[in-house]
Image (tube, rainbow, N blue to C red):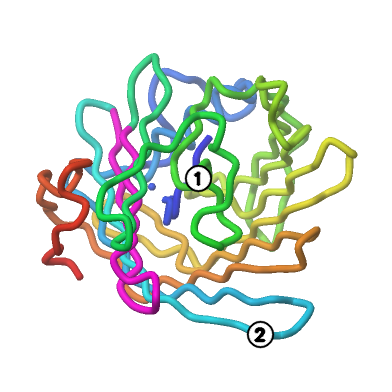
């Protein structure tokens, strides 16, 4: 399942997609599909916020302003993520979901001047010095994993699904992920990623879910910690709206254009 930021920003409607069954009958894969199909908009979602990257050893940090756009058309999602200040200003990441095939991803750097396609083998690489991976920004598909449903939990008063998911790729850096999903919003509250050693190597927590538009929920807070690198990425969404977005933005050959939403 992808979290795109935040959503996916991220990446990502209504809880309870028809035709899948009741909560007790759902398999792990069924729940993953519900997460994938929830919190999407045919008009578009615009997120604006601040990303803070912190070195947990030295205490040094840096801040970057971000804008994320997403839209769903014909059951497939498109998303854009851009830094709008700092030395990374203009850096833009495009994800195009495809049916029955790997998702396409492109990275545009102003210093390079042309987009570079992200290969499947680089899906787990870090995105521009953050603790988010290309996969976190939409690079994976539901069918890239096997799933096991664990007993539901109540966390902080929230009824939650709990999934264990295993990468099908033998070249993955991870052996499994434990994902806790808020049943009311179908958004992940937390993810623990286990390395091949069996130890937790990365964690993600999100919260402060806000309703946008009719039935779309967005996490206004997300923190990813790379335990091995002792580094964290904190994203706070300051503004989230559902609105019509220019579809021309989602074009690999137009990643250098300015958006009205900036």
| Up/down of 164 relative to 178, above or below | above
Front residue of this view, candidates 204 and 232 = 232
Q: Is residue 234 above or below residue 174?
A: below
Residue nearer the viewer, 22 or 211: 211
Residue 167 position within the rendered picture, expressed as x and y whole percent measured from the top left: 67, 26
Q: Residue at x 54, y 20 (%)?
A: 143
Q: Is 83 placed above or below 107 here?
A: below
Q: Which residues are magenta?
A: 76-96
Q: Quadrant of residue 100?
A: top left
Q: Secondary structure at mark 1?
A: loop
Number of disc labels = 2
Question: Which residue extends farthest top?
Answer: 100
Horizontal and vertical percent for residue 222?
55, 64
Of helix, strand and loop, which mostly describes the magenta segment? strand
In the picture, measured across the screen, residue 73 lies left or right of residue 193, that is left
Residue 134 - label = 1
Q: Is residue 144 left or right of residue 211?
A: right
Classify the position of the C terminus by image quarter.
bottom left
Seen in the picture, residue 31 relative to 93 is either above or below; the reply is above
Task: Determine which quarter of the picture holds residue 163.
Answer: top right
Residue located beneath label 2 in the image: 60
Whether residue 64 can be seen here: yes
User: Is residue 179 one of those drawn in magenta?
Assistant: no
């Amino acid at each position: 399942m992808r979290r795109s930021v935040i959503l996916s920003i991220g990446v990502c409607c209504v809880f309870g997609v028809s035709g899948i069954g009741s909560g007790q009958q759902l398999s792990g894969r069924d729940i993953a599909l519900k997460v994938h199909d929830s919190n999407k908009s045919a008009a578009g979602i615009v997120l604006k916020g601040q990303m803070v990257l912190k070195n947990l050893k030295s205490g040094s940090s840096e801040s970057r302003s971000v804008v994320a756009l997403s839209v769903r058309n014909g059951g497939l999602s498109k998303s854009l993520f851009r830094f709008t200040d700092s030395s990374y200003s203009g850096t833009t990441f495009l994800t195009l979901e495809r049916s029955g095939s790997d998702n396409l991803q492109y990275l545009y750097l102003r210093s390079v001047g042309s987009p570079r396609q992200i290969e499947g083998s680089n899906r787990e690489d870090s995105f521009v010095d953050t603790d988010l991976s290309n996969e976190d920004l939409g690079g994976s598909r539901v069918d890239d994993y096997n799933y096991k449903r664990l007993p539901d939990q109540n966390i902080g008063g929230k009824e939650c699904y709990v999934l264990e998911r295993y990468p099908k790729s033998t070249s993955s850096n991870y052996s499994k992920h434990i994902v806790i999903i808020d049943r009311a919003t179908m958004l992940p509250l937390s993810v623990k990623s286990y390395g091949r050693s069996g130890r937790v190597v990365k964690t993600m927590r999100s919260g402060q879910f806000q309703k946008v538009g009719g039935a779309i929920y967005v996490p206004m807070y997300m923190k990813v910690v790379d335990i091995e690198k002792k580094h964290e990425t904190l994203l706070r969404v300051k503004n989230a709206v559902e609105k019509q977005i220019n579809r021309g933005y989602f074009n690999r050959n137009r990643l250098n254009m300015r958006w009205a939403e900036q």
